[in-house]
Amino acid sequence: MVARLIESEIRFAEADLEAACEKANLLKLDTKDWENLNGSETW
């Protein structure tokens, strides 16, 4: 029973993550500036 509840929660979280990724992909943001910034940053 506990395993089924955990599995259900994982599926729910995966569905939320997938939906968020799909929405983010629809934005089609230009990330070239961000990538250039990250490439020049020294931590």
Image: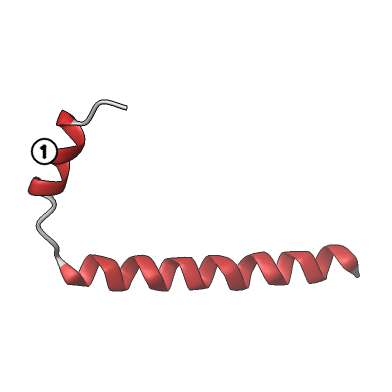
Q: Nearer the viewer, residue 39 or 15?
A: 39
Q: Residue at x 8, y 47 (%)?
A: 33
23 over 28 or under it: above or below? below
Assess disc 1: are there few (<14), some (14-19) or many (≥20) residues with their C-alpha within 10 Å of its C-alpha: few
Tell me which amino acid carries mark 1: Asn
Rendered-image quadrant of the C terminus: top left
| SS under mark 1 | helix
Query: Which residue is denoted by mark 1 in the rendering?
Result: 36
Percent from the top left, x then y, of residue 5? 80, 71
The single residue placed furthest to the front in the displayed view is 43
Q: Residue at x 71, y 71 (%)?
A: 8
24 over 40 or under it: above or below? below
Question: Image quadrant of residue 38?
Answer: top left
Rendered-image quadrant of the N terminus: bottom right
Q: Nearer the viewer, residue 18 or 39?
A: 39
Q: Is residue 26 left or right of residue 10?
A: left
Question: Image quadrant of residue 37?
Answer: top left
Percent from the top left, x then y, of residue 20? 39, 70
Q: Is residue 20 left or right of residue 36?
A: right
Q: Nearer the viewer, residue 31 or 13?
A: 31
Q: Is residue 12 left or right of residue 2?
A: left
